[in-house]
Image (tube, rainbow, N blue to C red):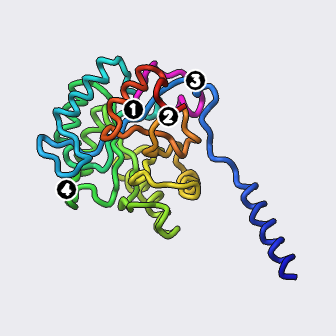
Amino acid sequence: MVILALAGGLTLALASRAAAPPLPQVHPGARKDYSALLMWHDVVQQKKEVWFDTTVAELDAQFQSIKRRRLTPVTLDRLAEHLEKGSPIAPRAVVLTFDDNNLGLYRHVYPLLQRYRWPAVFFVHTDYVGKKTGKDHCTWEQLREMERSGLVKVYPHTASHPPDLRRIPEKQLQRELVTARQVMERELGGKRPYFAYSEGHYDEPVARAVWKSGYRLAITEDWGSAESSRNLMMVHRYSMHKRAEQAVRDVARGSVGGRR
């Protein structure tokens, strides 16, 4: 009887796993292309407080490299349509993304975006908007101002930025995913269908929770082309702190040296 019960439990578990629908896939028509998301965090005038700060001079030099290599910054909406439907996208397309909503994004990144006339995405943890933790963070009004320019779009990066979404209770995970988006939509208006994992940590159950929460794309910190991602809930992104030269080179060459 015990053996039968164990066998029955295994059968149910396998059936449940088999019944789980696949996560949304990258459109086959997009697989031939090589686009990339590029990630930065805070941008500071001179002295770095943490290793993943970028100085204004460093960011300007990286923007110059992007321009010199003839990469094309595009919106995340444009990339999402390409990945979902296989729609054409500009050659050597990149999406510029900045995480954590530090005040340096308003003071230093925003003026550079205005100078280059390039679009960018800010992934923001909603609990700390306008507050000081280790650093000051942009206010909702500053985020609204930047969005009104047409250059910046803001999307959720959880509510409280837990270091690892895999390690938190399900109830908290739902708050990090759902409440963050609801607060952002109330404060900024419009739909906020894209999400970035805090500290890049995720697994398939977390990815499924993100999908069930209504997001179209979820962004990781796994390097490689967006088109080579396992699915739309695990979209690749290059860290510009670790792979800046490689990222620009890979996109310029259209996959040489990058993951497919």
The quadrant holding residue 28 is: top right
**Disc 4, disc 3: CB below 8 Å?**
no
Which badge, 1 or 4, is on the more N-terminal residue? 1
Find out whether the residues at labels 3 and 2 contact each other: C-beta distance under 8 Å. Answer: no
**Mark 1: which secondary structure?**
strand
Is 49 above or below relative to 244? below
Residue with the mark numbered 3? 32
How packed mark 1 is, by other alpha carbons closer than 10 Å (few <14, some 14-19, many 20 or more), is many
Tell me which numbered mark, 1 or 2, is placed earlier along the sequence: 1
Identify the residue at the far bottom of this view.
Answer: 1
Label 4 SS: loop
**Does 192 lie within the magenta span?**
no
Measure how far apart labels 4 and 3 are at the Cα level: 41 Å
Name the residue tied to disc 4: 135
Residue beneath disc 1: 95
Q: What residue range appears in magenta?
A: 81-95
Q: Nearer the viewer, mark 3 or mark 1?
A: 3
Residue marked by disc 2: 226
Q: Which mark is first along the chain, 1 or 3?
A: 3
Query: Secondary structure under badge 2?
Result: helix
Residue 120, disc: none
